[in-house]
Image (cartoon, coloured by chain):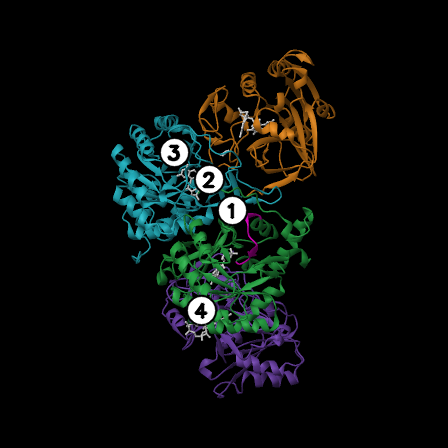
Chain colours: A purple, B orange, C cyan, D green
Amino acid sequence: MIKRLTLKIARIETETKNVKTFHFSHKLEAEPGQFIMVTDYENGEKPFSLSICELDHFAITVKRIGDFTNQLFQKKCGDYLSIRGPYGSSFFVSKKKVLLVGGGCAVPTLYFLSKRLLSNNADVTLINGAKTKDELIFVDKFHSLFIQEYFVTDDGSFGEKATSVQKAEEILKTDNFSFVYASGPELMLFALKDKLKKINYEFLLERYMKCAIGVCGSCTIDPLGIRMCVEGPVLNREKIEKLTEFGHYHRDASGKRIGF
Amino acid sequence: MIKRLTLKIARIETETKNVKTFHFSHKLEAEPGQFIMVTDYENGEKPFSLSICELDHFAITVKRIGDFTNQLFQKKCGDYLSIRGPYGSSFFVSKKKVLLVGGGCAVPTLYFLSKRLLSNNADVTLINGAKTKDELIFVDKFHSLFIQEYFVTDDGSFGEKATSVQKAEEILKTDNFSFVYASGPELMLFALKDKLKKINYEFLLERYMKCAIGVCGSCTIDPLGIRMCVEGPVLNREKIEKLTEFGHYHRDASGKRIGF
Amino acid sequence: MHKRLKIKFLGSEIDSPIVLPAGVMDMSFSSLQDAIINGAGIVTSKSLTVQPRAGHEGPVVAEFEGGMLNAMGLCNPGIDDGLKEIEQFKTNFAAPVIVSIFATNVHDFMQLAKKVDHSSAEFLELNLSCPNVFDEFGIPLAASPQQVFEIIKAVKEMTSKPVIAKLSPNVHAIIPIAESAQKAGADALCLINTVGPGMLIDIRMRKPILKNKFGGMSGPCIKPIALKLIYEVHSKIGLPIIGTGGVQSGEDVIEMWMAGASLVGVGTAVHYNGMNIFTKIKQEIIQFLEDQNYHLLMDVPRLPSQVREK
Amino acid sequence: MHKRLKIKFLGSEIDSPIVLPAGVMDMSFSSLQDAIINGAGIVTSKSLTVQPRAGHEGPVVAEFEGGMLNAMGLCNPGIDDGLKEIEQFKTNFAAPVIVSIFATNVHDFMQLAKKVDHSSAEFLELNLSCPNVFDEFGIPLAASPQQVFEIIKAVKEMTSKPVIAKLSPNVHAIIPIAESAQKAGADALCLINTVGPGMLIDIRMRKPILKNKFGGMSGPCIKPIALKLIYEVHSKIGLPIIGTGGVQSGEDVIEMWMAGASLVGVGTAVHYNGMNIFTKIKQEIIQFLEDQNYHLLMDVPRLPSQVREK
Ligand SMILES: Cc1cc2nc3c(=O)[nH]c(=O)nc-3n(C[C@H](O)[C@H](O)[C@H](O)COP(=O)(O)OP(=O)(O)OC[C@H]3O[C@@H](n4cnc5c(N)ncnc54)[C@H](O)[C@@H]3O)c2cc1C
Ligand SMILES: Cc1cc2nc3c(=O)[nH]c(=O)nc-3n(C[C@H](O)[C@H](O)[C@H](O)COP(=O)(O)OP(=O)(O)OC[C@H]3O[C@@H](n4cnc5c(N)ncnc54)[C@H](O)[C@@H]3O)c2cc1C
Ligand SMILES: Cc1cc2nc3c(=O)[nH]c(=O)nc-3n(C[C@H](O)[C@H](O)[C@H](O)COP(=O)(O)O)c2cc1C
Ligand SMILES: Cc1cc2nc3c(=O)[nH]c(=O)nc-3n(C[C@H](O)[C@H](O)[C@H](O)COP(=O)(O)O)c2cc1C
Ligand code: FES
Ligand code: FES
């Protein structure tokens, strides 16, 4: 039984026009890739990956997209939010030379991962990609870490003009990595998968979550039937290769299939 | 939550015409003075002190007295009994020179205590008393321990003709003990208490038990209101001196007061 | 500390919101005293009947994850001896006492109520909901709005002491029953009695664990049911409520309070932690009041209780 | 190993007594398959409705000592898409399927039943007892013997598949309802749906934790209630029973069996342990059979079920 925590928002950081980081002063024992369920008891309850998880505080980084996130953006420092978790699987923390590929607002979880990789003495390279300059996030935060960074934007407004996948393909040819981690839109991940013929990897996939404790079945993925809230959201190559659903469809709140 | 154990009777030993020891092959973590609740689901459920508690087995020693114990005496080796516990407080295990005073069928718990005292290097003296020779129990078992023993019977049919209390008074005058333990009929204990003006002691008192988990209130003792199934059945001098009920009355199954 | 937890209940000022509920550690004046010493504000007697009852044969309790079953079978020394324990309690303590009574017909309830009326106890509680004497007495009275009405009405005529009706959670609609109680003149409600009843089986001996087969569920796992019923009744019926069921911490007391309880019973938790659980609970309530900047427990607001359609 | 756990149920031979019950890990053909791979003998679909339902907003679950509350709100893709998942399951697996349906009136139940009748599923289950859609639909149908009778009667005319009626534990007398179901032609009963419902409160934000306020209780703490009702119904009504409620071990399955269940649902325990709990449970059943010298699960006798007076 995971106890629910009702915490005051300790600090709110504006990352971009539509992305904010919400900080909480509480020690949460979590691993990179894991997520928490967040609610204000008014507008539903939604999953968010941990972007920061230190000894005495943690944070989530949220993109404004619909009802829930809009309401979240109205909250002020000192307001209460209720959370439960951490839930789900986490990234394997390597000791070697690894490549992190992030797209859009799914990048922050790779920040938490980078910190753990670095403290494990891994050699970390990051591709941080977005459509345009204004949507690149955590640029400063990653900058303060001892990692190799590449910034790419679809329109070339910051860093190189390329997609994360193109950049990854390029680097993987020249450099010798032992593992790839990726978090981003599903079609980006799906495209990336094709480029990773010879290397081990883990992806963070998002599916509709309701219970987040592995009982309701909302988040299962075909044809393995595994629960993305427990056995996911981080899946390894072996599992991803067996998925028929990945890159093609997902299920909505009612369980109906929705194509990508 | 204490888990119920349903165990086969491993061995039945006949101690006297009306006393049997029931052995079970199971490791029970218990302290001397503690008791278990025993049931066959047919004839009620009753408390019995542990008389033996070794690494791989334990036993209770039962006097036939009414419905429940009569039925228990019909059981054969291999029959199931269901038990829960151990429950209640236990005797302080001294390292010094101590006197154990037992009366009738309440003596066996002092055997378990003796074993623990001996392994704690205490110097143990026992008075084992009964009305008559046939009612003395555990004579052989105590005999095999390195303790100083005195046997007394009211009619002198075995050992000295005396009550346990008389004998205790006598020994306490001549010898130097640091602690007294006693288990026996309440009026014996009540009489003994008067002889123990200057020495620390613990008595095992019996009260009507139903839940044995400290919730129903059947076993409380006036005026402390403490629960004899949790804070008892072993009480120390400090508590016993405060009791107005001790030696005068107890409560039956309905809670009605019954005089001794 | 004590001042902050004072509660007004049916005209009395009570030192602490914690109630020792019927049937838990209340067979003797001593344990009632022990409850007060440890921090209860009110104590309830075991449910007393006209004649003494030895109760069911054992096993009378069985534990499971989240709670316990009990089928004590209403053991009690009878109304006369039971009231003697109350009088003895009252010679030393001023704390208010609720006498719980149980009967199976209006006549006995009236007779019992009359005796309580002559006692020093402050309140009378009607146990209309014991689920453990089904074999003997059938479906609890509290399942029938009609019977609830008749008994309370009759009892009210026998006593000037405030009457608390203890209801059963084991019905599919509580409101009609609570309404009946109110119409009949009940001064307060006690919610809830034990849940179920339930059963557990010893699979090796192929026997129900309880001699009575069935027993009422209490303990932490029934708290959600208690909260739901308290909230529902508080939203619709304007009677003070003693909230009972699964409470084991100060935060649980606040939860009950927010749901609509005025006083809070702590029963089974005594088993887990002994009577000094009351001290712990009181400290935890104070802690909450301080963290949340409330001065008094009475300042803590209830849940916004949107009145719901039936 | 498998042979020893075979059960006859409504004319079918089932490989394992373990049922994946409605609403637990059954939104996709994949998770139904996963249940079979891990050792379930039958799987049940999520309760399907005429139209798709997104269900309640979150939080939809809340945990407490001994169990959890849920108020999913009957989210499901609707009968048509729901049955597609079943057909996809059936292309790979032969294991029997129960399709659960939910509606609020006889007409919709009939329409749903007709569709299930045309599907490859073996059994039809009527969810008459969801406690989580009270606001929308009022008191569960299963609280009224009359309604239970009408719905089952009507459904039986729409389908030749065996019909299982899933009843509510939240009534003060189950027998009249089970009798109605039997008279109307139900082939089996499923006991029990979730208990309560219950409620939990966040005392810092002063809000019910569930968005729906109330949710049904499941998990280990409801097992005693399930056992009691199964035992009671089995003693008096001659219908096979799917026993569901709080089962998490092989010994729990035996307990359900002794109380009178023919098959045993394992729901919430999947949350605690994942689907491989089924493998563990099967091993534990075999262990018990061996220890107690039974060859088959079907050889294990029931509790002696003394028929009790009402
Ligand atoms: C494991 C996981 C980690 C996530 N981490 C982050 C994160 O760190 N930062 C972030 O901004 N977002 C994250 N998300 C997505 C986030 O949950 C959605 O953005 C949010 O639920 C949108 O809610 P809304 O009401 O604002 O928008 P809506 O209008 O309700 O939905 C917009 C889209 O969000 C997705 N979504 C909505 N509800 C859910 C749900 N219950 N479960 C999963 N997806 C949902 C759907 O794709 C939907 O189309 C994560 C999702 C998952 C599954
Ligand atoms: C802590 C404790 C330890 C005990 N240890 C032993 C022991 O090691 N060996 C032994 O032979 N006996 C022991 N007893 C006493 C034993 O419980 C009773 O002998 C037994 O309950 C008698 O049951 P019955 O049906 O045979 O007799 P009944 O005819 O029912 O009762 C005879 C007498 O036994 C006592 N008794 C009955 N029921 C209970 C009960 N539920 N709780 C307490 N006392 C009861 C009463 O004094 C009663 O008058 C112990 C009692 C207690 C409280
Ligand atoms: C051992 C036991 C005996 C009980 N006896 C009575 C009783 O005599 N009368 C009554 O009204 N309630 C009785 N109850 C119910 C409690 O008063 C209380 O309503 C219930 O246990 C729920 O609270 P809890 O979870 O805090 O124990 C009894 C409960 C227990 C556990
Ligand atoms: C998350 C969840 C969803 C459920 N949904 C349904 C449902 O749609 N239809 C139904 O008949 N029962 C539903 N139930 C009830 C279960 O089928 C089962 O009867 C109940 O949970 C008790 O079993 P358990 O303790 O093993 O979970 C649901 C239970 C849970 C926990
Ligand atoms: S969200 Fe319910 S099983 Fe994953
Ligand atoms: S026997 Fe119930 S409190 Fe001691």
Q: What residue appears at the point 63 percent right and 81 percent down from the top-left corner?
A: A196
Cα–Cα gap, marks 4 and 1: 32 Å
> Which amino acid lies under the numbered mark 1 shown in the image of this protein?
Ser
What is the magenta range?
Answer: D258-267
- When the figure is inspected, residue C122 is found, relative to residue C190, above or below; the finding is above
Cα–Cα gap, marks 3 and 2: 15 Å
- Residue B137 is situated, as x and y percent measured from the top left of the image, at 67, 22
Name the residue that disc number 4 marks: D112
Task: Answer with left or right where residue C160 lies relative to residue A119.
Answer: left
Q: Which numbered marker is on residue C45? A: 3
Q: Secondary structure at mark 4?
A: helix
**Viewer-nearest residue: A250 or B120:** A250
Name the residue that disc number 2 marks: C270
Q: Secondary structure at mark 1?
A: helix
Nearer to us of marks 4 and 2 is 4
**Magenta span has D124?**
no
Circle 1 Cα neighbour tier, 10 Å, few/some/many (<14 / 14–19 / ≥20): some
Seen as rendered, the residue at the extreme right is B144
Name the residue that disc number 1 marks: D235
- Residue D211 is situated, as x and y percent measured from the top left of the image, at 39, 62
Q: Secondary structure at mark 2?
A: helix
- Distance from mark 1 CB to nearest ligand 4 atom below 8 Å: no
**Viewer-nearest residue: C103 or C265:** C103
Q: What chain letter is assigned to the residue under label 3?
A: C
